[in-house]
Amino acid sequence: MYIIKLDAIDSTNAYLKAMATVNLPKDFTVVVADKQTDGRGQMGSTWISDSGKNLTASVFKELSGFDVEKQYFISMCIALSIHSALEMFKIPKLSIKWPNDILSADKKICGILIENVIKNNKFQGSVIGFGINVNQIQFDNLPQASSLKRITGKTYDKEELLSTILKQIPLYFEALESQKFDDIKREYESLLFRIEKPSTFKLQNNEIFSGIIKGVEDSGKLKVWTENDIIKSFDLKEVSLLY
């Protein structure tokens, strides 16, 4: 792996995407920053991070010729890689909140943002960004956020954590490139937050409804068994799972 370390940057994803517009970075090029001034999350949300206390990084994965219809498996692989690494640090009660947040004891400790690189109308690869709350303690006005230190009381070495994650990512992409789609999805679904449990959801129009998560489609849509005994599929823009 080729690792670029920065003191501060607006966004590690933006940095890698800018590189890709000139020449595609080497496979598994990594950008890691002590501070992000404009970190982003899903649906345009902002990632708030105290300088030097958390892990913010992005990885370029070369995927030329990859089936775009299977792109949600990229998200699954990254979520599973980070989940697996955090297990090695004995972080308790880990789960994956659809589509790809990592939770510990029902609190968000990691967010993931994946942006695909398209050139000449062809899929070239993905810029995979992740932010992990490591040693930050205070999260003002973010009641669902937590960190590794807040959960366990321990201070963590960010370099060691990054190294562990970067060892897991190629293992899951090896499975992806071997087209072990069923194995990847089975493991991902087994770790889904609130799977097979009655849960509350909110639609775009703010309508609230109850249902039970049954899994995900290959496209990444969430399968929910609704109150009228029908399994409906929702994409990220249509529904949010409430805690």
Image (cartoon, rainbow, N blue to C red):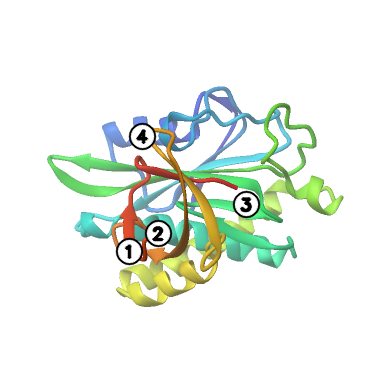
Residue lying furthest front in this view? Answer: 228
Residue type indicated by callout 3:
Leu
Mark 1–mark 4 CB contact (< 8 Å): no
Residue position marked by numbered label 3 in the rendering:
162
Q: Tell me the CA gap for discs 4 and 3.
A: 20 Å
Q: Secondary structure at mark 4?
A: helix
Q: Quadrant of residue 180?
A: bottom left
Residue for point 41% across, 55% down: 75
The one nearer the camera, 222 or 87, is 222
Residue position marked by numbered label 1 in the rendering:
230
Residue 17 is tagged as 4
Residue type indicated by callout 1:
Ile
Q: Secondary structure at mark 1?
A: loop
Residue for point 77% across, 41% down: 135
> Closer to the camera: disc 3 or disc 2?
2
Q: Tell me the CA gap for discs 2 and 4.
A: 39 Å
Q: How many marks?
A: 4
